[in-house]
Image: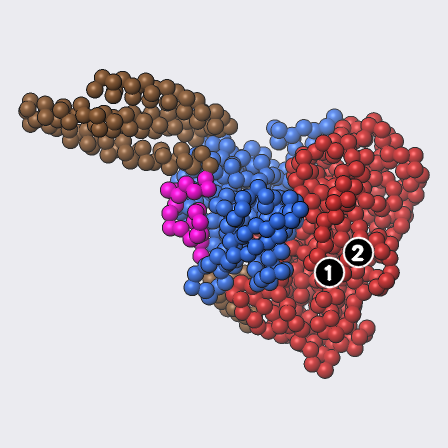
Amino acid sequence: MNAPAARTSGSHVLIVGGGGTGGALAHDLTLRGVKVTLVERGEVTSGTTGRHHGLLHSGARYAVGDQESAIECIEENTILRRICPGSFEENDGLFVAITDEDMEYLEPLLKGCADCGIPTETLTPDEALRLEPLLNPDLKAAVRIPDATMDAMRMPLRFFATAKHGGAEIHSYMEVKDLIVHDHVVSGAVVQDHVTGKEGEVRADIVVNATGPWSEQIASMAGVDVPIRPSPGVLVALQGRLCNMVINRMHRSGDGDIVVPQRALSIVGTSSWTVDDPDDLGVPEDHVQRMYEEGAKLIPAVKQAEFRAAWSAARPLIGSRGQADTGRELSRTFKTYDHRESDGVEGFVTITGGKGTTLRVMAELCADVICAKLGIDAECRTRDTVLLPHEAYYAA
Amino acid sequence: MTETRRFRVFRFKRGDRGPHLDEFDVPVTARTTLFDAMRWIQFNRDPSLALRHSCLHASCGTCGVRANGREVLMCVTAVHDLGREITVEPIANIPVLTDLVVDMTEFYARFPEEHPLVRESGFDLGAEASEGVATYQRYEDCIECGLCLSACPVVATTDRYVGPGALAWAQRILEEPRDEDVLSVRDWADDPDGAWRCHAAFECTEACPSNVNPAARIMQLRGTLLGPRLTSREMPR
Amino acid sequence: MRDTTRADGVPGASERAARGPVLRKGVGPSPTGWFDPRGRAIGSWAFAVNRITGLGLVFYLYLHLGVLSMLLSGRSAWNDFLEIATTTVFLGLDVLLLFGILFHGLNGVRVALVGTGVVPNRQMALFLAGTVIGTIVLVYGAVHIVGNG
């Protein structure tokens, strides 16, 4: 295990939000010698991070419409396999064409992947069925891409574990009630500890808002606005491991166009709409039905599979209010907002957007901004630092 | 159609003299899960209620509780299966952190050093590889929820018994060694507080939400440990 | 890290670091361990009854030795004992003893076969088979014990 850098400064960073982004940022800053405290109102990854279907993106899904995202994905896909060995089912994925209309997407998909550096292999229907016998037998073509499956909670947990053993303080069940702001300077947070029931303060040189779809709530405590639209989607877990590879529909993003294996379950997702309150998502019944219908087009056995769970998870999508109703049109890239530049508020940074696959690079770019603000000259070391196993998070 | 169920929820904050039960009447429908009900309480009645959850689909194992004395995962337990009045407590035999949340440090402390997460299907006798696939990777079934530890009557009597979860892991390593040090795992399991402490109550298998069947694995482990002894074969060193 | 020295800046850090209360099975923080069958499945009941019958059989063994020692006290002492031994209550206890022997023995066979990895997956089948055999023998035995008393 790499030893943490000697403390390069007396600076203290408080990260609000214990999702994948917060965890990766805690790890990155700790490696750069910064003292980090992270507070999360529930269990770590209990926001959006733990709820996604567990896909390690190859980027192929974005290769046609959002190449910036696609390139980010394939790069991080490679890096994560290196720094989190043994945390992925590395079985690849398939893009499957069911209709003639799907076939029109084949060429753009292959070209898009080639442009983005995503390796592909075109398969005949027979070859695809030999790999995945439960696929729709009427499939017309399949393309193999380097998707992989992760445990949505345990992979990010490795970042937390490494950060913790490097000296970061990770406090779950500690909820930020307000930020401490004087004269446009954020100097800490008022927290409620749900373990002891007590209230207290945590002071820091920089407070980072890494709360994903809750970004607006925290930002408003500092009197600033961030253009985050919580954009939930429904996912359905079915009994039975209906596939070993990730199965994607070969078309532009749509509802129910992916099936991901998770141990002895199969996850069908997802849909998209926008809400105002990330704590009130709901699970629309018609969306659940749509998962069954669309999923069955890829794998007919979905229709008969026994129900295990249906839930919603909110993506933190960047865009301004009033723009787009479904959320899909908004970019899936991420952004760091230094609120001194955008709002004249010192000591406060928001990192948001992105997806599970890009947690490490989000943290890298945010940590660059933070270190620049703190006047710390330290390079990112997360690309090559192999992370501790997830159970180290719970080690005394 | 909405009706109301009464929940008695275990509450404990550090510094309290002892725990108590809070009562809440929660509106529920046919689809409401125990997790939905607890979160409703958290958002509408008492924001200080601490809940542990992450994936919401029985994949992460973090939302284990005891509902009316039985170990369940909140996110996949329908309230209407639980009765009119429901007592919700944290899982047993693991120290409580706060309210319904336990501190999993002592769960993980019972495991042998490193336990791998992903296995190759070739070693899994029950796996069906498709024609075009020689082998594939697959996560171990165990989602580390701790329900087995909570259900085990032997764990209830002692903190030294390593427990069903850890022993099931050990059996998996002996079944599929990969690069693990099989001998050290054997020695770890071959202990009065290891595989020999189990008394075949089979509560762990009953409670497990993820098909691990820890009780049968402990028995298989014992068979593996006994084999060389009964045939007086020297264990390879 | 459960390190109480890093208590600066975070409220209640030392209380967090302390070991929390440990609940045992049963409603509320109960001190009972294995002998709390509330909310348990059949496997735990078998486990608990096996222990009780085990204790019962040990107790019976000493009792029996004590009774046999009456033989040393001569014929009349033994005859006095036999009078008690043929009362209905005593015979009823004999049936209870038979249940204890059957349960402990048959469940013990199940535990031995399952617990050494011989038939780890058939524990329920063995339990049911034992129940059937045990019930038949118990009924037959009870009828004969009380009937002939």
The chain letter corresponding to red is A
Quadrant position of residue A246: top right
User: Can you name the residue that lies furthest to the bottom here?
Assistant: A183
Residue A177 lies, with reference to residue A142, above or below; the image says below
Q: Which mark is residue A274?
A: 2
Residue toward you, A395 or C81: C81
Q: Can you tell which chain is drawn blue?
A: B
Q: Residue at x 56, y 33 (%)?
A: B175
Of B96 and C7, which appears nearest the observer? B96
| Magenta residues (range) | C21-40
* Quarter of the image where one finds residue A26: bottom right
| Residue B215: % across, % down | 49, 35
Pointer 2 indicates a residue of which chain?
Answer: A
- A190 versus B169 height, above or below: below
- Mark 1 to mark 2: distance in Å? 9 Å
Colour for chain C in the figure: brown
The residue singled out by tag 1 in the image is A277
Q: Can residue A33 be seen in this view?
A: no
x and y, in percent, of residue C101 in the image:
31, 26
Q: In which quarter of the image is residue B196?
A: top left
Of residues A43 and C14, the one drawn nearer to the viewer in this rendering: A43
Q: Which amino acid does label 2 sit on?
A: Thr
Specify whether C100 is left or right of B62.
Answer: left
Q: Which SS class for mark 1?
A: loop
Taking the magenta stretch, the answer to whether it contains residue C22 is yes
